Amino acid sequence: MSDKTGMAPIRDAAATGVLSIDAMGGDLGPEAVVSGLALAVKKIPAIRFIVHGDKPTLDALIAKRRGLSDHCTVRHADDIVAMTDKPSQVLRTGRDTSMWSAVEAVKSGEATVCVSCGNTGALMAVSTIRLRKLPGVNRPAIAILWPSRNPSGFNVMLDVGADIRADAEDLVQYALMGMSYARNGLGLDRPRVGLLNVGTEENKGRTELKDAHDRIEKVAVDNGFDFVGFVEGGDIPGDRVDVIVTDGFTGNVALKTGEGTARFVRDMLAEAFRATPLSKVAALLAMSSLKRLSRRIDPRRVNGGVFLGLNGTVVKSHGSADETGIAAAVGLAWNLSEAGFSERLKARVAAATATLEQTAPEAET
Amino acid sequence: MSDKTGMAPIRDAAATGVLSIDAMGGDLGPEAVVSGLALAVKKIPAIRFIVHGDKPTLDALIAKRRGLSDHCTVRHADDIVAMTDKPSQVLRTGRDTSMWSAVEAVKSGEATVCVSCGNTGALMAVSTIRLRKLPGVNRPAIAILWPSRNPSGFNVMLDVGADIRADAEDLVQYALMGMSYARNGLGLDRPRVGLLNVGTEENKGRTELKDAHDRIEKVAVDNGFDFVGFVEGGDIPGDRVDVIVTDGFTGNVALKTGEGTARFVRDMLAEAFRATPLSKVAALLAMSSLKRLSRRIDPRRVNGGVFLGLNGTVVKSHGSADETGIAAAVGLAWNLSEAGFSERLKARVAAATATLEQTAPEAET
């Protein structure tokens, strides 16, 4: 139970199981990344990595962990993408960075999934330029797992910040991609998809949302998912839906508001336990139960935004991820790799694009 | 401490102190509303109410609470606005409702502030039609208080759902109105105002946000507030700002996501305490500390969205508010009434509109 990541059990073991790791991007440096890889290897002995970054540093760090070098191929990169680098600048001058090299290994087919804790904007830009968008996808999206009341323990939400806007057609694509992710990532046969709005009545909200509502309803049957219609912010951690579809601006605000609120409540709780001698004793007695709670809502356990809509899968880990967070992102990448997710998503989008072209309103054909 | 509402102490005692109460709109009916009024009277003996609704019912409920009738004038209304009534329908046929009557008493000057737990859309529609928008205000907004790390215990956020969109000019108005509310409602001399975005760099986000950023920066100095620039979802419960400005769609999603997350964490915590015999003992020992925490993050204590931008102030209480929630909304209304908030806001908007017209970009003059 304690190391459950909410991922479905591995079913297809056909893939080669090589992940491409950008070891240089995170706030805590390559040491945290290599520790995370070592943690992941303990849980998944079959895993293999191509690790990108400064070779002398990485070789030394890997050598310190017994047996880890058997799982790793180190690929040297001279340069690092900084958290403050602008995406456009990285596209122009970033060919020698560990991030670029890590994405390149997915492009060349040497690895199935790329993992990086680097700068989100730069990673999205490099991934889009090198892997290219799937035919039929206008805007790629970032999907995250959100702790919820559902039996799997999680919901999927997208887009949480790949783009700052989305039109009706993008939202339909997000519904399809999110559904495919929930199926392969959470192991749900028939995911329930909802469209985020400020009310649940069908006549409410912005025009593009009403339009997207009708179009998602149409594609739901053919694509084997249930469309529950409009959902509200309160449903994001709830059990009414499995996949929450929204534009990247709203999704990013919701994500950060939720994280901030959870952190606020946690800090207030810690303060409450320090308040009196009795409450301090209580904190000791409740320790194991509180640890369980803390694990349930620990953002490190669901570390990993997945870029959807490209030819290949990229997992973006939190910049501040420690070894636990890195191991979670690597575990997620492994599960997606083993499920053959990139290929399945591609097939899903291709089939749906054909259907969409048939059902699109006259004015748009 | 235990009944602190985060409101500034009352300083101007000049106003007449009559509040207009729609007693029929809430989910729990007039009984909860009258109980809330009785609670408020205990804390604020000078308070007086005009109570709108079914007179026989209200007379009977008020008579049951000793001394309450001295504070109340009951005004009969035949009809009730239901939670499912559409705003347009209420505007056409709602003249005999308790909601309409309650707003009318502010319009006529008999009361300073109106409080209702009714249907938000209908209340906003009736308030806008009867009280009319302040000169210079295009879109009224709903402002709420959000539990935060700030010394006052709260931040102000607006708009949380009066409208589903806002252009740059609206956002500038929201900044001014939210600042005035923070000054009069939270007693802050120099509120710090932030504009909600998906990053804090100045070049990020939608065009209207960049435009609003520059314009709010210009009006900040003349209006005595600090503009901290862009803020993110995580700052909503934080201590970087006092006022968070956003459009009604984003604000509503953030509000409901935050509420949903807090509820989720609270439920998980309760579950953790029920998990083992030891944790059950711990819950008993920590009871008083946990109650304090629960009070700190209790949404009922900050019950009351305030409609800003109209000729007169309307407080919207949660539909599901119980007597504690009603009393909090009434206490908020009282503080705003005593601060002469409606007049101050009007003066602020008038002065700023003049400045704005001078500083507006050429293309828009």
Image: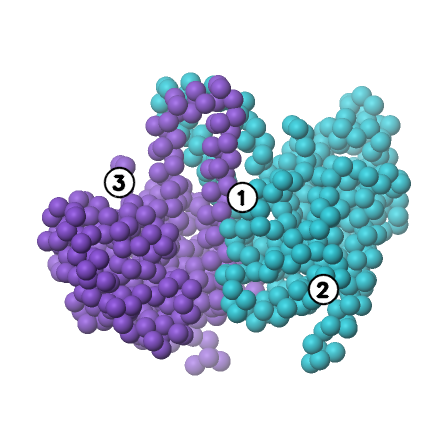
Chain colours: A purple, B cyan
- Residue that badge 3 annotates: A3
Chain for disc number 2: B
Given residues B164 and A283, the one toward you in this image is A283
Give residue B348's quadrant in the image.
Answer: bottom right
Give the percent coordinates (x, y) of residue B283.
Answer: 45, 22
Give the percent coordinates (x, y) of residue A99.
Answer: 29, 66
Q: Is residue B287 left or right of residue A147?
A: right
| Mark 2 nearby-residue class (10 Å; few <14, some 14–19, many ≥20) | many
| Upstream in sequence: badge 1 or badge 2 | 2
Give the percent coordinates (x, y) of residue B82.
Answer: 67, 46
| Mark 1 nearby-residue class (10 Å; few <14, some 14–19, many ≥20) | many
Q: Where A6 sits versus A110, above or below?
A: above
Q: Which numbered tag is attached to residue B259?
A: 1
| Residue pictured at 34% horizontal, 76% vertical | A93
| Residue pictured at 59% horizontal, 61% vertical | B229
* Quadrant, the N terminus of chain A: top left
| Residue pictured at 89% horizontal, 41% vertical | B14
> Please, what is the three-letter code of the amino acid marked with disc 1?
Glu
Given residues A13 and A249, the one toward you in this image is A249
Would you say the residues marked 3 and 1 are in contact, meaning their CB atoms lie under 8 Å apart? Answer: no
Q: Where A252 sits versus B156, above or below?
A: below
> Please, what is the three-letter code of the amino acid marked with disc 2?
Val
Q: Is residue A81 left or right of residue B105?
A: left
- Residue that badge 2 annotates: B219
* Quadrant, the C terminus of chain A: bottom left
Give residue A228's quadrant in the image.
Answer: bottom left
> What element does badge 1 sit on?
helix
